Image: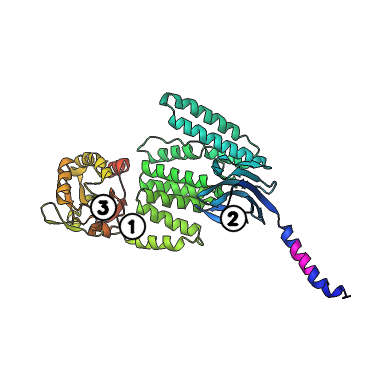
């Protein structure tokens, strides 16, 4: 017989390895009938996107997540597009139960009161909002009262996640446009964030926080001049917990892109890089900031020299000494045509006081271009090389969408970009009081 000591080393090594595998704690389990995927995943929300945090093998529809993740709100599922929220609180082990058909609409939680209550709240509120949107106008107030009642109740919950979502599910109130930027900012801030307690540690890891920030910035940019949004926005972001500041700048960058406000995008991009220096998107954002540097506020406006409707070359620099709005548009651009009547009114009001417009068309059809000018009664200077998006002027000013405007001061420097509607009107009132 061989001495047992010959095997003691390997045996103990095997026992240690087995013990280590078994000692990994389970923090999430599930059983989904009909699930044929090899794995399911857990994702963590990091600065505007879901990043993979863990994976679990699926066997006969069952799976268990083992290991260690920090407490917070995650997304479980097949991909960021096919998943739903789960709270990992370190106190209980949520168990997911469901069927693969309409899984994320019908699954349930077991063994986790916090997840059970949050799921009920989310589904109830979503149903009420859908019903409210489909109801006749005279019945919507009834649904709004029901929503408010549910959220007030949720705000008293003993669970952090439920309380946080009771804040973020409130429909924001947006004030009407006002020439007083300070009052407008205060009203927008109150309408979006009145109920939010920024000290809650769950907020940075919740996608709804980021999406609400996007809506907040979009409304501010729609109702206020860019420079006012920068002024009040910077103070607001600095007042947030440090864990939320990078997300706020990224949300502003996205909002600026939505409105084609490249100046705001550069401004927000610089601050995002400073707040999140190791973010993998940094090189791309830095490249954008550098490329747009020559078109920033205070820089000389690149000269444009293109033929007008009669074929005569007209130059932007001819208008030095006036406030000039470079208006990139086209006859086929419906938003441009909708905007034109307001621009006509502003031109008639301020032209005699030193305001001029230099219209640059991205048309390719000469007849359509001229007909649109005549139909909309656009009596200012118009130029075009009839090359559409390949227009030399559009390339020079990095135009990616229209309508798009650039305001040039009497010294020929860029003063603002993307002014439209109430913002353009407010700026002209400021320049010509």
Residues at marks 3 and 1, CA–CA distance in whole angstroms: 13 Å
The one of 351 and 360 positioned closer to us in this rendering:
360
Residue drawn at x 61%, y 49% is: 72
The magenta segment is 12-18
Question: Which residue is tagged 3?
Answer: 409
Marks 3/1 in contact by CB < 8 Å: the verdict is no
Quick check: is 271 in the magenta stretch?
no
The one of 52 and 83 positioned closer to us in this rendering:
83
Element on which disc 1 rests: loop
**Residue 420: quarter of image:** top left
Residues at marks 3 and 2, CA–CA distance in whole angstroms: 59 Å
Quick check: is 14 in the magenta stretch?
yes
Mark positioned earlier in the residue sequence (1 or 2): 2
Element on which disc 3 rests: loop
**Left or right of residue 406: residue 130:** right
Residue drawn at x 30%, y 58% is: 398
Q: Position of residue 129 (x, y in %)?
A: 49, 33
**Residue 133: quarter of image:** top left
Q: Is residue 295 above or below residue 226?
A: below
């Amino acid at each position: 017989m061989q001495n047992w000591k010959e095997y003691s080393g390997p045996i103990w090594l095997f026992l240690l390895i087995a013990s280590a595998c078994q000692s990994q704690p389970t923090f999430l389990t599930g059983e989904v009938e009909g699930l044929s995927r090899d794995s399911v995943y857990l994702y963590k929300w990091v600065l505007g996107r879901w990043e993979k945090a863990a994976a679990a093998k699926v066997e006969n529809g069952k799976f268990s997540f083992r290991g260690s993740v920090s407490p917070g709100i995650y997304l479980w599922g097949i991909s960021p597009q096919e998943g739903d929220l789960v709270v990992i609180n370190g106190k209980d082990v949520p168990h997911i139960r469901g069927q693969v058909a309409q899984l994320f609409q019908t699954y349930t939680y077991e063994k986790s009161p916090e997840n059970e209550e949050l799921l009920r709240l989310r589904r109830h509120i979503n149903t009420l909002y859908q019903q409210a949107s489909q109801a006749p106008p005279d019945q919507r107030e009834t649904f709004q009262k029901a929503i408010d009642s549910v959220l007030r109740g949720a705000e008293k919950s003993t669970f952090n996640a439920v309380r946080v979502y009771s804040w973020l599910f409130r429909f924001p109130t947006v004030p009407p446009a006002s020439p007083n930027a300070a009052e407008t900012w205060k009203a927008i801030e109150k309408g979006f964030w009145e109920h939010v307690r920024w000290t809650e540690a769950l907020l940075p890891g919740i996608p709804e926080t980021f999406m609400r920030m996007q809506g907040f910035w979009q409304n501010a940019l729609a109702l206020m001049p860019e420079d006012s949004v920068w002024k009040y926005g910077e103070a607001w972001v600095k007042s947030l917990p440090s864990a939320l500041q990078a997300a706020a700048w990224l949300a502003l960058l996205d909002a600026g892109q939505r409105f084609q406000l490249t100046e705001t995008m550069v401004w927000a991009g610089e601050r995002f890089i400073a707040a999140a220096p190791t973010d993998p998107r940094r090189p791309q954002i830095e490249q954008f900031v550098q490329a747009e540097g020559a078109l920033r506020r205070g820089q000389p406006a690149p000269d444009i020299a293109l033929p007008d409707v009669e074929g005569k070359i007209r130059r932007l620099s001819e208008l030095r000494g006036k406030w000039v709005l470079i208006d990139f548009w086209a006859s086929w651009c419906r938003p441009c045509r909708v905007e034109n009547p307001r621009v006509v009114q502003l031109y008639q009001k301020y032209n005699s006081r030193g305001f001029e417009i230099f219209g640059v068309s991205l048309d390719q059809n000469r007849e359509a271009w001229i007909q649109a000018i005549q139909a909309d009664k656009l009596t200012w200077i118009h130029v075009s090389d009839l090359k559409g998006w390949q227009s030399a002027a559009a390339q020079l000013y990095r135009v990616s969408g229209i309508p798009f405007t650039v305001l040039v001061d009497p010294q020929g420097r860029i003063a603002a970009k993307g002014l439209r509607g109430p913002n353009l009107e407010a700026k002209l009132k400021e320049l010509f009081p």
